[in-house]
Amino acid sequence: MLSDSPKLSKEEIRRKIWALMEETGISRFPKPVYGRIPNFVGSNIAAQKLAEQWEFKRAKVIKVNPDSPQRMVRFLALLNGKTLLMPTPRLSSGFLLLEPRKIPKRAYEDASSIRGAFKYGEICSIDEIPNVDLIVAGSVAVSKDGVRVGKGGGYSEIEYGILRELGVVDEKTPIFTTVHDIQVVDFVPKDVYDLIVDAIITPTKVIRINDAGERPKGIMWDRIEIERINEIPPLIQLRKLKSLI
């Protein structure tokens, strides 16, 4: 675990965690972990612990990031009859919706991969996204008070902002992350657009965050360059939708 003294920037935290995971042999395929939400030893155990939480059990629709360490979360969602909403990498094709009743049970494992999700899921426009009961986000690191560090692209925040704008999530929608214990750090600097998670789930423990604080109510349009908006189909759709209201 990284010490909070001196307090590091998010980029410094990323680099230290990536290096630490490689050096200690905790990282798993795909490698190298640099620039990724890193896969880790025990990711399947953490996923099983997540599936034991009451928020998972009661959820009908779960949004899960497409990264490798959360593949078991996606599989368990399908196995337990949950509708799975998965953003495509970099949101380049928007969101995929996977309905377990439409997928052969023998194909759930395949469908939990990125390639399989494209095969068995359906790309949905933003007006087809259902209400989401639980969000599972990947992290490079996360602080004990729930501030997460992603890989630096801001996609988790953009995805959340889109869902808030659409009204399919709200302030009370729980957000979980699964990480290795070594990825839990003492301090992460918080920005106004950051997502605070409600629970950190590792292979050995479940850390509940008592007060996640106020979350972004939508897309912070003034912080996204027009060139980037034009690279993300759901943002283009959302912008057009807002112009019609």
Image (cartoon, rainbow, N blue to C red):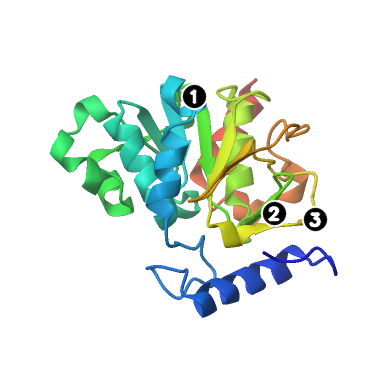
**Which quarter of the rendering shows the C terminus?**
top right
Q: Residue at x 45, y 27 (%)?
A: 129
The image shows residue 126 at horizontal and vertical percentages of: 48, 30
Residue 187 as seen in the image, left or right of residue 115: right
Going by the numbered disc 2, the residue's amino acid type is Glu
Say which of 231 and 118 sits in front.
118
Using the numbered discs, state the Cα–Cα distance from disc 2 to disc 3 in whole angstroms: 23 Å
**Which quarter of the rendering shows the N terminus?**
bottom right
Residue 218's quadrant in the figure? Answer: top right
Q: Residue at x 46, y 28 (%)?
A: 56
Identify the disc placed on residue 225.
2
| Sequence order check, earlier mark of 2 and 3 | 3
| Sequence order check, earlier mark of 2 and 1 | 1
Q: Which residue is mark 1?
A: 54
Task: Please tell me whether mark 3 sits on a helix, a strand or a loop.
Answer: loop
Q: Is residue 43 above or below residue 7?
A: above
Residue 97 as seen in the image, left or right of residue 181: left
Question: Can residue 119 be seen at all in this image of the molecule?
Answer: no
